[in-house]
Image (cartoon, rainbow, N blue to C red):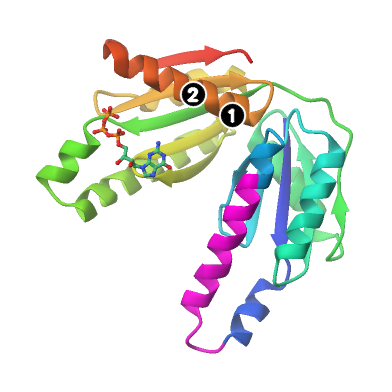
Amino acid sequence: MKVLLLELYNYREWTELLGEDREWKIQEVQHFLSYRLVDRVSQMGGALLPLRYDLFLVLADGIMNAKLTSLFRYAVRLSPVMVRGCMGHGRNPVEAQGEANDCLHDLEPGRLSLGNYEDSPVAVVHYDLNGFRDLTAQTSMYNAFVEVQKLVLDVMLRTYKLGGVTQYLGGDNVITFLNPEDVDGALDLVSTNVKAGVGIGFTPRQALRNATKALTEIRKERKVLWKIVSGQ
Ligand SMILES: Nc1nc2c(ncn2[C@@H]2O[C@H](COP(=O)(O)OP(=O)(O)OP(=O)(O)O)[C@@H](O)[C@H]2O)c(=O)[nH]1
């Protein structure tokens, strides 16, 4: 599988230039960057995980290097600091990001390093709490938010061991990208409280769309807790 890591270089030094009344300014820049990059990456068929906001992970299977190069140039134009980017590959996204991470260490800011690796199919598990709206109504919005953060941590720790990378999307939605062969282990987290739509595709975006289809089908019948949808 292929992953592109984009790192905002010397980000900390930049944040310190903003003075002490700075956190809101940093938030503005981070959300702006992630808004523009999510759009660009999705147009290419990929998926962007904003992670720490100064480090973006792009699931890159099925995307041509020329497009990734143009994405990098776009990020360079938008970013307040220098950017560097590396592609890594491996059996799963965790291995791939490890290789990309090692490559970033030795790369000069402003540079992009891509490899010519074979594309692999991509799986995403979209976890969704059952009864989130009821929980919110019966307790409070903040309480429901705390419950979701517990799910995020459970999912992240369990799927990291399986080679998956996880991102909180919002609401009660948590996604993990994995090698399709490792999806079974990720379904251990499914319970009467948590359902999962699994999508498999030739691009990360296709996988995400299929996971949403799977969740929609689960909701229609409410008979199963997980479902897999694959194809274009
Ligand atoms: N799909 C999605 N929903 C989001 C996101 N961010 C916030 N939301 C909100 O997350 C909530 C999701 O609620 P649901 O999962 O439909 O609620 P539920 O009560 O658990 O219902 P079921 O899933 O049908 O059992 C909604 O309030 C959405 O508005 C996001 O990134 N993706």
- Horizontal arrangement in the rendering, residue 208 relative to residue 144 (left or right): right
| Ligand 1 has an atom within 8 Å of the beta carbon of the residue at disc 1 | no
Residue in the foreground of this view, choosing between 10 and 181: 10
Residues under labels 2 and 1: Cα distance? Answer: 13 Å
At 60% across and 84% down in the image, what residue appears? 16
The residue segment tinted magenta is 19-39
- Horizontal arrangement in the rendering, residue 90 relative to residue 142 (left or right): right
Give the percent coordinates (x, y) of residue 144.
23, 47
Viewer can see residue 225: no
Please, is residue 84 above or below residue 16 in the view? above
Disc 1 residue type (three-letter): Leu
Ligand 1 quadrant assignment: top left
Judging from the image, what secondary structure is the residue with disc 2 in?
helix
Give the percent coordinates (x, y) of residue 21.
47, 86
Give the percent coordinates (x, y) of residue 28.
52, 69
Callout 1: 10 Å neighbours few (<14), some, many (20+)? many
Which residue was labeled with disc 2? 211
Where is residue 180, by image quadrant?
Answer: top right
At 38% across and 14% down in the image, what residue appears? 217
Q: Residue 33: within the magenta?
A: yes
Q: Residue furthest bottom?
A: 19
Dot 2 and dot 1 residues touching (CB under 8 Å): no
Disc 2 residue type (three-letter): Ala
